[in-house]
Image (tube, rainbow, N blue to C red):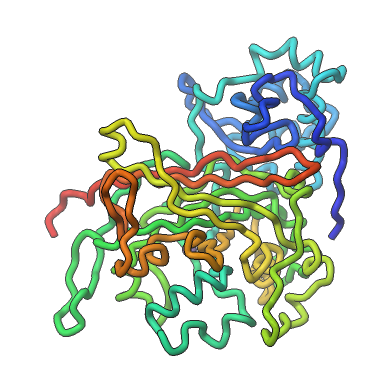
């Protein structure tokens, strides 16, 4: 792995898009995340790069010749209707596109003069577009990489042995459902399912009464390893295009009845929401930190999950928040309130370890695969990344400033995730939002 800062990270860079320079935007010129959007007035989705409150329309920019120097493969990929063609090309080309976009959008370059002349054609207002899922996702795997989340949840179900003996050796995951991944802003219908609230009585079928969110980051896979080939940890990051916000909606009552012995199934496959913007690992470069420090006495990772560079710089310092806006808050015109705030640095496994482990049996990972981190929870109660933990499985309902309380989500609740990176000597960058509102269960007969 190589870690490098270049001129695209320079905190003094300014864009000719004024809103990119206000110091609070998630999308200054040092970020330049990729997404796929749809105009109000046009159906065909397009690749875009966020800049301030605007978007560089890559289809229009490529057609105007702005990326011609990168060759026909890149030019074609930028004119596609999903990120898959770019993901197939790999991180090297994505890095070059980001560099070119930086020169197009920063103040004072010859490229910028040309781009400014094309402004009406290649720049669109973020308010006038809708985000779509950024890639056609082939396979979705969700991990369980926060030891604090695993311990908190384990305690509720197994007070004597919260953490199972495999946890510190194997990155635990389950295979999720790709077809029900939806973009930010898509309403989420409360699922029906089988539950068994009374262990003495037979199970029943009906709307979930324990609907929850899970605060996570997703890693979008680029490149491909052939079936039977593994990805060594030292090269795993070359297979990660970038990170996005991810909400692994979970019906806890369905989950607790169905998950033994093969893991989550219908409790999670009804919807997974992804944020609209994929923050490249290149943009995250200034925010690298060491991997999680294992407490004294924990086993070292096995050799295939151990790499000095991953240990010293495989983590990312990302702050994440969960906000909620209930139907009552909306009716009173009140703003959303914050439920929790945590950090990605609390994860027991790095994203590179998750990807290397995933391929370690020869499983082929393909461009457009999505890897979820697992619920991001830290040591403190205020950093717990789902309601199951925050409200201690209903024992300590969360009190909201509206006078309401929540053990689990109610119909009409809107859940909003945000994340950002900030440190001295670097421009603050953010992830945008990942939001979804709970709608009542379908009216079909129970
Ligand atoms: Mn999850």
Q: Nearer the viewer, residue 442 or 74?
A: 442
**Considering the image in quadrants, where does the C terminus appear?**
bottom left
Up the image or down, 424 lies above or below 256; here it is above
Task: Tell me how many marks there are.
Answer: 0
Residue 29 at what x, y percent from top left? Answer: 73, 31
Residue found 64% across the figure and 19% down from its top: 123
Q: Is residue 37 above or below residue 419?
A: above
Residue 309 in sight here: yes
Quadrant in the picture for the N terminus: bottom right
**Residue 86 in picture, x, y percent from top left:** 69, 42
Classify residue 168 by image quadrant. bottom right
Tell me where residue 149 appears, x and y as whole percent.
50, 69
Q: In this view, does 285 lie to the left or right of 49?
A: right
Q: Residue at x 42, y 52 (%)?
A: 180
Residue drawn at 63 percent across, 41 percent down: 430
**Farthest residue, direction left:** 445
Residue located 55% across and 65% down the image: 378
Q: Which of 342 and 134 is in front in this view?
A: 342
68 up-or-down from 318: above or below: above
Q: Where is residue 192 in the image (x, y as percent from the top left)?
A: 24, 60
- Is 271 located above or below residue 197 in the figure? above
Q: Can residue 142 be seen in this view?
A: no
């Amino acid at each position: 792995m190589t870690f490098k800062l270049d001129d695209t990270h320079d905190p003094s860079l300014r864009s000719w898009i004024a809103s990119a320079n206000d110091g609070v935007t998630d999308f200054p010129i040092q970020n330049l995340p990729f997404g796929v959007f749809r105009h109000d007035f046009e159906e065909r989705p397009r690749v875009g790069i966020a800049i301030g409150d605007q978007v560089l329309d890559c289809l229009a920019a490529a057609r105007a010749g702005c990326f011609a120097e990168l060759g026909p493969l890149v030019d074609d990929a930028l004119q596609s209707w999903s990120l898959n063609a770019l993901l197939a090309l790999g991180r090297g080309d994505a890095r070059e596109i980001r560099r070119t976009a930086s020169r197009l959008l920063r103040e004072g370059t010859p490229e910028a003069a040309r781009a400014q002349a094309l402004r009406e054609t290649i720049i669109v207002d973020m308010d006038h577009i809708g985000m779509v899922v950024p890639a056609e996702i082939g396979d979705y795997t969700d991990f369980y990489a926060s030891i604090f989340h695993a311990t908190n949840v384990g305690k509720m179900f197994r007070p004597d042995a919260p953490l199972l003996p495999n946890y510190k050796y194997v990155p635990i995951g389950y295979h999720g459902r790709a077809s029900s991944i939806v973009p930010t802003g898509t309403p989420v219908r409360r699922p029906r399912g089988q539950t068994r609230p009374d262990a003495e009585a037979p199970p029943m079928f009906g709307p979930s009464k324990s609907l929850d969110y899970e605060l996570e980051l997703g890693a979008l896979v680029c490149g491909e390893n052939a079936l039977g080939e593994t990805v060594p940890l030292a090269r795993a990051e070359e297979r990660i295009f970038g990170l996005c916000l991810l909400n692994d909606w979970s019906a806890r009552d369905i989950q607790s009845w169905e998950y033994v012995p093969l893991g989550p199934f219908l409790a999670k496959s009804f919807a997974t929401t992804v944020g609209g913007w994929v923050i490249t690992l290149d943009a995250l470069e200034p925010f690298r930190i060491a991997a999680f420090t294992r407490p004294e006495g924990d086993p070292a990772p096995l050799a295939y999950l151990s790499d000095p560079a991953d240990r010293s710089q495989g983590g990312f310092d990302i702050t994440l928040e969960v906000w909620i806006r209930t139907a009552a808050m909306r009716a009173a015109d009140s703003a959303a309130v914050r439920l929790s705030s945590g950090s990605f640095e609390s994860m027991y496994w790095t994203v590179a370890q998750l990807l290397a482990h995933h391929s370690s049996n020869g499983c082929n990972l393909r461009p457009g695969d999505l890897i979820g981190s697992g619920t991001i929870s830290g040591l403190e109660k205020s950093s717990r990344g789902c309601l199951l933990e925050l409200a201690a499985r209903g024992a300590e309902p969360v009190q909201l400033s509206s006078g309401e309380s929540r053990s689990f989500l109610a119909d009409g609740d809107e859940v909003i995730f945000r994340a950002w990176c900030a440190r001295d000597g670097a421009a603050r960058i953010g992830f945008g939002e990942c939001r979804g509102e709970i709608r009542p269960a379908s009216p079909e007969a129970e």
